[in-house]
Image (cartoon, rainbow, N blue to C red):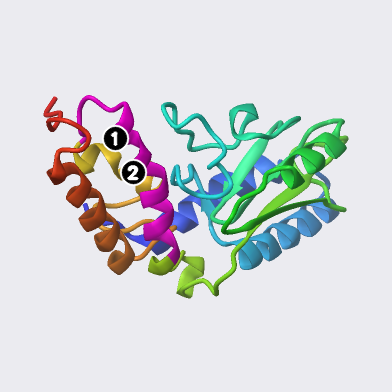
């Protein structure tokens, strides 16, 4: 089935709204929270299920164990009840918002800035302290808040190239797509990158595979 970005984004948004804006909120609070959620999507892009492993929000990880979700292994402290967007995420701890914010600002990335702020809105549950963590890029994004090729390709290469030092087998592109394109994704694009960028990424990745630098291609 062809990947339909609008449909994937709409489905992800509905799941995120159901989680962050529960029916237990009063009608007035729900209205405020839904408006705030729409503003967040407008600012940092559509709701998503997982990041490309080269995305600045999750890039601080062990190179042998890449991560697709923000957590302690990617440098964050105090995350709880978290939902993701293309260029940021909302986490809703009941206490300790400061440690979330402090840890986000401690993540130094050479290509993007990671910032965080506590939100003055109700998300997830009464008593939670929502925090918005954002990735601020040095270049304008493509339409649909997608990451331009000039950033996505080198970030992917920076992550994958060092793996030649310890890799024994090369993974097929079909296996790597969720890690390099993010979730949700199709065969040629995702909510993070358009078809042109995804094709350039595939060509760059397959050039490394075909060089033999990772070892023989893993077929199973």
Q: Are marks 1 and 2 in contact (CB under 8 Å)?
A: yes
Give whichever of 25, 206 is nearer the camera. Answer: 206
Decide: few, some or many residues near mark 1? Use Cα within 10 Å; few <14, some 14-19, many ≥20: some
Of all residues shown, which one is farthest toward the front?
165
The mark total stands at 2
Counting from the top left corner in percent of width and height, residue 171 is at 22, 34
Question: Quick one: SS at disc 2?
Answer: helix
Q: Position of residue 157 (x, y in %)?
A: 36, 51
Is 21 in front, or is 60?
A: 60
Magenta span includes 72: no
* Mark sitting on residue 164: 1
Q: Which residue is mark 2?
A: 161
Which of the 4 image quadrants contains residue 87?
Answer: bottom right
Magenta span: 151-171
Most common SS among magenta residues: helix
Residue 213 x, y percent position in the rendering? 20, 38
Q: Position of residue 37 (x, y in %)?
A: 69, 57
Is 164 a magenta residue?
A: yes
Q: Is residue 220 visible?
A: yes
């Amino acid at each position: 089935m062809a990947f339909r970005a609008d449909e994937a984004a709409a489905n992800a948004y509905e799941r995120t709204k159901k989680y962050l804006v529960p029916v237990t909120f009063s009608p007035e609070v729900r209205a405020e929270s839904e408006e705030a959620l729409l503003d967040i999507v407008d600012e940092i892009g559509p709701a998503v299920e997982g990041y490309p492993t080269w995305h600045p929000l999750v890039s601080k990880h062990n190179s042998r164990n890449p991560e697709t979700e923000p957590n302690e292994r990617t440098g964050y402290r105090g995350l709880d009840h978290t939902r993701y967007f293309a260029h940021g995420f909302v986490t809703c701890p009941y206490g300790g918002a400061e440690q979330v914010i402090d840890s986000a600002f401690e993540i130094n990335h050479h290509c993007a800035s990671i910032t965080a702020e506590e939100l003055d809105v109700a998300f997830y549950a009464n008593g939670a302290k929502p925090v918005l963590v954002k990735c601020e890029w040095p270049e304008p994004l493509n339409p649909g808040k997608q990451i331009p090729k000039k950033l996505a390709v080198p970030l992917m290469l920076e992550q994958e190239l060092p793996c030649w030092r310890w890799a024994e087998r090369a993974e097929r592109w079909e296996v790597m797509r969720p890690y390099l394109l993010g979730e949700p994704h199709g065969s040629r694009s995702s909510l993070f990158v358009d078809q042109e960028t995804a094709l350039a990424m595939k060509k760059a990745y397959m050039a490394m595979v075909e060089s033999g630098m990772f070892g023989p291609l893993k077929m199973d």
